[in-house]
Amino acid sequence: MNQANRQTTAAPPQAPVQKDSNGLQPPHGVPSLPEPLVKNALAAMNYVVKDMPSYMFGLERQEFISKKLDSVDERAIQVIRQFYEAVLLRMRKTDASDIDLGSFGARGHIWMRIHGDKTPQLDLPEIPTLLTDVMIQGLVTAKQRITLLEKRSLDFSFQTQVEGTMHRYRGTAYFDLDSLGMNMRAINATVREYSSYNFHQNVTNITNLRFTKEGLILITGITGSGKSTTLDAIIDMNNQESDSHIVVVASPVEYVHTPKRSIIRHREVGRDVLSFKEGTVQALRQDPDIVMIGEMRDPDTIMAAIEITDSGHKVFSTLHTSSAVESIDRIIGEVPPIEQDRVRNRLADVLRLVVSQKLPPTTDGKRTLAKEVLVVTPSVRSAIKNGNTGEIYQMIAEGADLGMITMEQDLKRLVKMRKITTTEAMNYANNKKRMKQLLAMQ
């Protein structure tokens, strides 16, 4: 925010603390939010909107809040952020992965996803929609607020420091019935060890720059399936073992890698570069060995990723698909029909590996990784080029010697280990008929 243009005002007045009507206590071992902090934060939020005309709604109301935040004393914004940082600390203490708040759907509550279940945290203070509008806008910069108001959505990163440890979060703010809603996801403070994935050595050779210098590797799955965690583990493995240059293009940048044997550039879309496509194309001129594209979300980015891979680079990216075959079909289907034959041939030539992930609940109420692994062999490559992707599932099922496994085979493995139930195996299977057959063969 421009300090020169900021009008200094008196400290915001105090507001009464909102108590939870249920009188619930926080979970055992989780501290309550300090009452003075809650009181001061609510007072600051009320101060921002105290002069708002009653006829203001929708975008006009959000614009009023944005302008007021540009002019209030910095202390008001700081106390709002301190309150939210205390909520984030609570999120870490309860092992929650996500936090949601704002707009009509939240009913004034702060919600958290803990081991897969998203529930309101009834011991935390209720915050009216108008005040969550203030809080959400107060967590981002003035420039980001402009983007939010113009595009009705904003992806951003947020970070806090607790006892010398930096914690990062991936946030998305968006309009919902003329008010603002927000989701924020916790990013692991440490990278998961690559060895914990127990990938076949052949798969490791494909992902490791020391053994394979080029090719496209995809990590796929629905939102919240751990794609970014897997990508970061692979990047960290290369960072430890390869003398190289790694360029990360993400929206937003989540885990920030400390350079070890590699130099690593982190380019955040909307902050350091304008789009995934531009970040990908620009990376080609930066002498990279590895380019990590956070998400192939549109045809332009898909084509740019294929082109940079075609030029002899190693490219990692993600897709929101639930199986390896669906990932291939999605890429081909994203381009116009007149281009599909050309893209099918190029994809077959550059694709090396697809890992599709899910996180089924375990018998002890947590989550575990189930994965499908496709290694692109000459037979797979031929099936892609000939448009016979339906044949690939059987190739995966029969490719264990090369490190391949279907989602159903991996779910059966988890059932045999008693990590998940047969019911969850059926729920998370892509091919229900095949899953039923495999379970019957136990």
Image: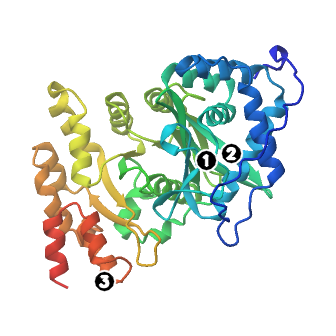
Q: Contact, CB < 8 Å: mark 3 with mark 2? A: no
Residue at point 35% right, 31% down?
298
Three-letter amino acid code at the position of disc 1 = Tyr
Name the quadrant of the C terminus: bottom left
Mark 2 packing: few (<14 Cα in 10 Å), some, or many (20+)? Answer: some
Q: CA distance from mark 1 to mark 2?
A: 6 Å
Q: Contact, CB < 8 Å: mark 1 with mark 2? A: yes
Disc 1 marks which residue?
A: 169
Mark 1 packing: few (<14 Cα in 10 Å), some, or many (20+)? Answer: many
Q: CA distance from mark 1 to mark 3?
A: 35 Å
Residue at point 28% right, 71% down?
425
Measuring from the top left, give residue 254's x and y in whole percent: 57, 46
223 horizontally vs 442: left or right: right
Disc 2 marks which residue?
A: 159
Residue 243 is labelled as none
Mark 1 or mark 3: which comes first in sequence?
1
Disc 3 marks which residue?
A: 416
Mark 3 or mark 2: which comes first in sequence?
2
Three-letter amino acid code at the position of disc 3 = Lys
Q: Secondary structure at mark 2?
A: strand
